[in-house]
Amino acid sequence: MEVRKIEVIDIPIPSSSNVIIGQSHFIKTVEDIYEALITSVPNIRFGIAFNEASGKRLVRYEGNDEELIKYAIEAALKIGAGHVFVLYVRNAWPINILNAIKNVQEVIRIYVATANPLQVVVIETNQGRGVIGVVDGFTPLGIESESDKRERYEFLRKIGYKK
């Protein structure tokens, strides 16, 4: 194996959206994730793109939001790694859909689910490209205080994720 380069890809995240990047293994990924999303959250808006790793090696795509489909295709092309999918969502949070996505038979792994600034680290060899990892957000600045804990506790209850 010959390592040609390691590249850091900035992934844009449009306003009011989240991105999920993962790996799958079969051409029907986009259709099956589409069905998982539509049946999980009413009114979800999304675009998904999947890099086919053999055969025609096309970027396959689906969705119900043209802007998010465009973002997904562009990000998948920039990453350029086989069997990687990029999913942009609005009107839902990753916590609402991750289990449904993980239960799609073709899905192998989830690299990231975030609204934070995002970078994907990609390696290129003589065969192709692969995802090494992701940089999600920023480096921690400290350890939470008791006040920070109370703030976290109150916030989760305010938005309805805890009682």
Image (spheres, rainbow, N blue to C red):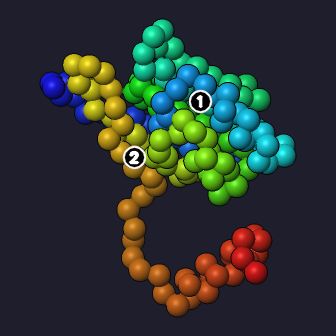
Give how far across and how far down residue 30 sits, in percent.
Answer: 63, 28
Give the residue at the far top of this rendering: 56
Nearest to the observer: residue 29 or residue 96: 29
List x then y, in percent, for residue 107.
Answer: 53, 39
Q: Residue at x 71, y 28 (%)?
A: 63
Q: Name the one closer to the observer, 99 or 112.
A: 99
What amino acid type is highlighted by mark number 1?
Thr
Left or right, 15 with respect to 128, comes to: right
At 65% from the left edge and 36% from the top edge, which residue is drawn?
33
Tell me where residue 35 sits by quadrant: top right
Task: Give the residue number, with chain letter if any, for mark 2.
Answer: 134
Image position of 4 (left or right of 122) = left
**Amino acid residing under circle 2:** Val
| Residue position marked by numbered label 1 in the rendering | 29
Residue 58 lies, with reference to residue 116, above or below; the image says above
User: Is there any visible trace of residue 98 in the rendered image?
Assistant: yes
**Among all residues in the image, which is located at the extreme left?**
2
Q: Secondary structure at mark 2?
A: strand
